[in-house]
Amino acid sequence: MAILITGGTGFIGSHTCISLTEAGYDVVIVDNYYNSSPKSLARICELCGKDLKFYECDIRDKAGLQRVFTENKIDAVIHFAGLKAVGESCQKPLEYYDNNVNGTLCLCDVMRQNGCKNIVFSSSATVYGMHNVSPLKETMPTGGTTNPYGTTKYMIEIILQDIAKADPAWNVTLLRYFNPIGAHKSGRIGENPNGIPNNLMPYITQVAIGKLPELSVYGDDYDTPDGTGVRDYIHVVDLAEGHVKALDQMLTGNKGVQIFNLGTGVGYSVLDIIHAFEEANGVKIPYKIVGRRPGDIATCYSDPTKAREVLGWETKRGLREMCEDSWRWQSMNPNGF
Ligand code: NAD
Ligand code: WQD
């Protein structure tokens, strides 16, 4: 069975290509290399032990996508391709709406023209907005997003649900990820941010390797046990395995729209992460407390019960392993790919 992976050479996509290959699926990748590179593709193929079919193509290029569907019998699409930097999305809203929302419209149109109506979409905990109280459940209201990136995720969720409503032949699975960190055990693939990282774990690993002098902890006056922000960090390989389970489930009959949180259900603070990283890897992380980052919330973690009950999926890798694997990737690849 052939699965098209958009954004398949990126951080989560690359790990998912490996888990899918291990599960026996044939993988076809589309990526425009905006935030990845041929080196990532080479490493994915190395870890899969075979050459995966790859198209360098923007998902907004309908003719390019049509070629992919003509040359391959695609049974389902896992749609990772998108821009993901929250801060940048406030500076470049047009680019974010065009790439993420318009890109998804183009993809779905080509899928429909080719009779492929199975899609798994990379959504985000960000769709729960600022006002729901953790643990977050799939039944809680969504919206009230505070930046264009989050709004693209919210809009795409609505669009895909409307498509499935209009044509019940569509199967749409929305996966709401919490905070993916860690890397493949081999240290050959991992997260490769451009410039100074926005997210906590890549920032910590770059401090650990000496590329950045110290971490700024954004606020210690939140209403949390130690005052710093609490998040649900999930190992990227657990996340990748969640995609395999979601796909298995979607392809065993018509499922319509399904929505799952992919998280551990456990919240850790920024200081917990710093200390866990230091302990797991024997490296010191100098840090200073600074003011809150605009748009941050105090606490965000999942209720992962639905994914466990319906998909039979749960996370297997704990915080120590996430820290070890993030560090192995960074130390083996000080300058990324
Ligand atoms: P990533 O940037 O590493 O991967 C995205 C990939 O998509 C990149 O390889 C990029 O080159 C490609 N891409 C972007 N626009 C494209 C286009 N128009 N056409 C073709 N390819 C394009 O990001 P990631 O962390 O792997 O995230 C994957 C998905 O998961 C994204 O949709 C992201 O919004 C979502 N997500 C990520 C996180 C996170 O913290 N990493 C959390 C929740 C949701
Ligand atoms: C985690 C915690 C920060 C950096 C973002 C997106 C979300 C999703 C995942 C895509 C917070 C603190 C961070 C630093 C810090 N992405 N922090 N110093 O903000 O939970 O989620 O990525 O969908 O939509 O918003 O992740 O890793 O940026 O922050 O103190 O240098 O670490 O304040 O408490 P976040 P993050």
Image (cartoon, rainbow, N blue to C red):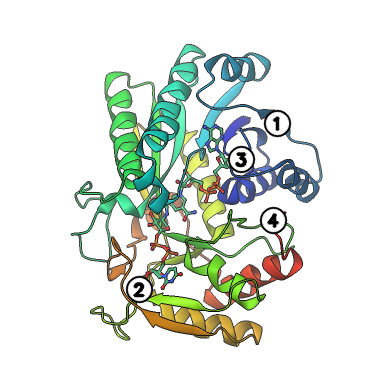
Dot 2, how many residues are within 10 Å of its Cα: few (below 14), some (14-19), or many (20+)? many
Of the two numbered discs 1 and 3 on the same chain, state the one appearing first in sequence.
3
| Label 3, ligand 1: CB separation under 8 Å | yes
Of the two numbered discs 1 and 2 on the same chain, state the one appearing first in sequence.
1
- The image quadrant where one finds the C terminus is bottom right
Q: Which residue is drawn at 64% across and 58% down?
A: 190
Spatial CA distance of label 1 from label 3 is 9 Å
Spatial CA distance of label 3 from label 2 is 29 Å
Q: What residue type is labelled 3?
A: Gly
Residue labelled with disc 2: 230
Residue contact at pointers 1 and 3, CB within 8 angstroms:
yes
Residue labelled with disc 1: 54
Q: Is mark 4 on a helix, strand or loop?
A: loop
Q: What residue type is labelled 4?
A: Ile
Q: Residue 29's spot in the image, x, y percent?
A: 64, 33
* Residue 33 sits in quarter: top right
